[in-house]
Image (spheres, rainbow, N blue to C red):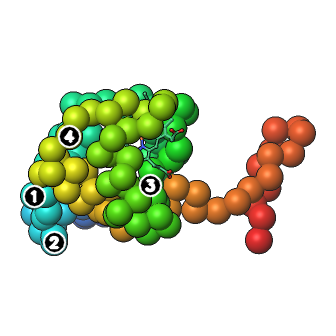
């Protein structure tokens, strides 16, 4: 068994770890530094207002009428994206976006593209429900 002084030391250590961890967790200064892209932020707002996620996925989450757009920027390029945003297609509506809105949306998709891949790894779902990661 622990003696009283050992308990006090242990309690002290846990208490200070708790305080330290809490400060670290809620101190968001480090997450807010780095490149803060106002244009991409505007693009995100337009993305939300126009509800692009209803038909498109980002990181494979979203609607399934249109394709995943996580890596469209690096795979197909900004001109390709712009062509869709300018006039839409038979299936995708024309949102009548102006130049500024199109530029902002492209900046947003560029930022998303830089943040990760929509399909980071391939895996096989076996018929017993287990998932096996491919090499
Ligand atoms: C009603 C569903 C719908 C909405 C809402 C929608 N899209 Fe689409 N989008 C599509 C479909 C479907 C395609 C595939 C092209 C086609 O089949 O005509 C597409 C294609 C695209 C492409 C080309 C992707 C590729 O890899 O070929 C981009 C970029 C795109 N959409 C961006 C957007 C943005 C940005 C918004 C929001 C402003 C948006 N879309 C809203 C349905 C939609």
Point out which mark residue 97 bears: 4
The answer to whether the residues at label 3 and label 4 have Cβ atoms under 8 Å apart is: no
Q: Secondary structure at mark 1?
A: helix
Q: Is residue 119 visible?
A: yes
Circle 3 crowding by C-alpha within 10 Å: few under 14, some 14–19, many from 20: many
- The residue that disc 2 covers is 34
The answer to whether the residues at label 4 and label 2 have Cβ atoms under 8 Å apart is: no
Circle 2 crowding by C-alpha within 10 Å: few under 14, some 14–19, many from 20: few
Classify 47 as above or below 29.
Answer: above
Q: Secondary structure at mark 3?
A: loop
Q: Secondary structure at mark 2?
A: loop
- The residue that disc 1 covers is 38
- Position of residue 122 in the picture relative to residue 89 (left or right): right
The span from disc 3 to disc 2 (Cα, nearest Å) is: 21 Å
Q: Residue at x 48, y 30 (%)?
A: 91
- The residue that disc 3 covers is 70
């Amino acid at each position: 068994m622990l003696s009283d002084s050992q308990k006090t030391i242990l309690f002290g250590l846990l208490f200070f770890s708790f305080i330290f961890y809490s400060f670290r967790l809620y101190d968001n200064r480090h997450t807010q530094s780095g490149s803060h892209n106002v244009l991409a932020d505007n693009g995100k707002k337009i993305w939300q207002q126009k509800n692009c996620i209803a038909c498109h996925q980002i990181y494979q989450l979203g609607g399934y009428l249109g394709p995943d757009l996580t890596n469209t920027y690096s795979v197909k390029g900004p001109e390709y994206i712009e062509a869709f945003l300018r006039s839409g297609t038979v299936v995708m509506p024309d949102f009548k976006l102006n130049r500024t809105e199109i530029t902002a949306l492209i900046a947003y998709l560029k930022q998303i593209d830089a943040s990760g891949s929509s399909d980071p790894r391939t895996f096989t779902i076996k018929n017993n429900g287990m998932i096996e990661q491919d090499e």
